[in-house]
Amino acid sequence: MLTILGRDEGRDDHGVSRRSFLTIGGMALGGLSLPRLLRAEDAPTARGSHKAVIMIFLAGGPPHQDMFDLKTEAPSEIRGEFKPIGTNVHGIQICELFPRMARMADKLVFIRSMVGAADNHYAYQCLTGRHQRGPQPAGGWPYIGSVIAKVEGPVSRGVPAAIGLSPKTQHRPWGDNGQPGFLGAAYAPFTPEGEEVRGDMVLNGITLERLRDRKTLLSSFDRFRREADDSGSMEGLDAYQQQAMEILTSSRLAEAMDLSKEDPKTVERYGKGSTKPQDDGPWARLDQFLMARRLVQAGARCVTLAFGRWDWHGKTFARAKENFPMLDQGVSALVEDLHARGMDKDVTVVVWGEFGRTPKINKDGGRDHWPQVSCALLAGGGMRTGQVIGATNRLGEYASERPVRFQEVFATIYHNMGIRPQQTTMVDLQGRPQYLLEPEDQPIRELI
């Protein structure tokens, strides 16, 4: 799977093909196999507690009024088929298809009043907190994983700070793991692709001594370095190479991705789900929730993943009967696991989609796009959980109490990470400092 110094025809003076040099099985490291890794800067390793975020994207826009904000008093064409059930927090009710979450509602936060969504099918707003079609600095806004990787640096040299588990999707914006924007390719997320991701990191036929022959490696990169410098597409090639070697020679990342090393009871608790794409969207894979926890334990600071396809313009309730129980199992297993391991104070979990769904059920038994209001689920991060934030009117049309913007959720995540977004700047491609958020984007006061 890994070819580093193999000879081939029509190659450079050292007999090395750039293509073979950069190939490492099906493992894509930020879009380009070896060199396009997170830059190995002089950031310190773990400093005290290891703060992290796991972001779960529900591609397509989940139906808020069928999940956490049921409207039992609304007309039949609005209220839907499902009934609410009580939770272990007095006064909080959610859909009957989420019994596991209901039993642990004291560890969750239900936001019923997300506003400011754009009516577009992409993960961009959930990954950056900004509109894709809004004002952009040169190079574009970086997603949260790239920001955290830049500001905080790696915890472990062998584990990238930002990792994306979302698969490639037919509708590509739904499989977006995040873009580094003006921070550049060095801060792109590590994105394992394919079923046997751990196998792609095994050195087959290459000894560590040969891999660590720095002089040979550097000479093999000569021509590639010149071409990269001419195009201006990459800088600090030695740093890319160094972190590539760290990942390849360290067992931390490979072991984190090897679920066979996990307690079988824990694996069973999470479940497997399905690796088959749901139409043109992501898979409904449950073991990626477990993978996310293991990656954070290994040193990742931000893990993003996509679960299911939620753009249900027809047969909403049949699709919900399939997806709701799986989401219930995956999220509850993750939150329960974080608490059991004492990670709940440090790891923030966010579950959301790009917008909500129409109050009125259409002729095909579905709900259409509704950017006016949507929902989100939060957990961990040391937040004050066991509460509902916001409310919608009787028909679920708009936020009637405490509207929450996407930027407020991002401000809360940064607060939980120990990052001050109004005081922290990053330099864009024009040399201008850019703040992470605007002054009005403050953490959700009810949670901190």
Image (spheres, rainbow, N blue to C red):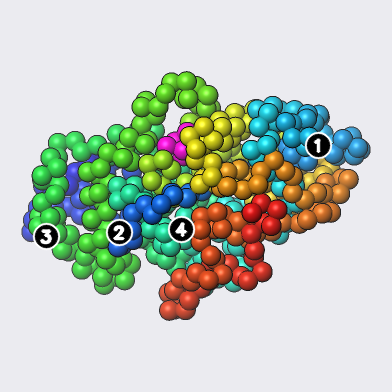
Q: Which residue is painted at 31% across and 62% down in the image?
A: 41
Mark nearest the camera among 1 and 2 is 1
Q: CA distance from mark 3 to mark 4?
A: 33 Å
For the magenta stretch, what is the residue range?
288-294
* Residue 383: image location, x then y, percent: 62, 48
> Which residue in the protein does label 3 denote?
219
Q: CA distance from mark 1 to mark 2?
A: 49 Å
On-image quarter of the N terminus: top left
> Which residue in the protein does label 1 denote?
91
Which amino acid lies under the numbered mark 1 shown in the image of this protein? Gly
**Mark toward the start of the polypeptide (4 vs 2):** 2
> Which residue in the protein does label 2 denote?
40
State whether residue 220 is above or below residue 78: below
In screen coordinates, is 235 left or right of 188? left
Which amino acid lies under the numbered mark 2 shown in the image of this protein? Ala
Mark 3 and mark 4 residues within 8 Å of each other at the beta carbon: no
State whether residue 399 is above or below residue 324: below
Which amino acid lies under the numbered mark 4 shown in the image of this protein? Ile
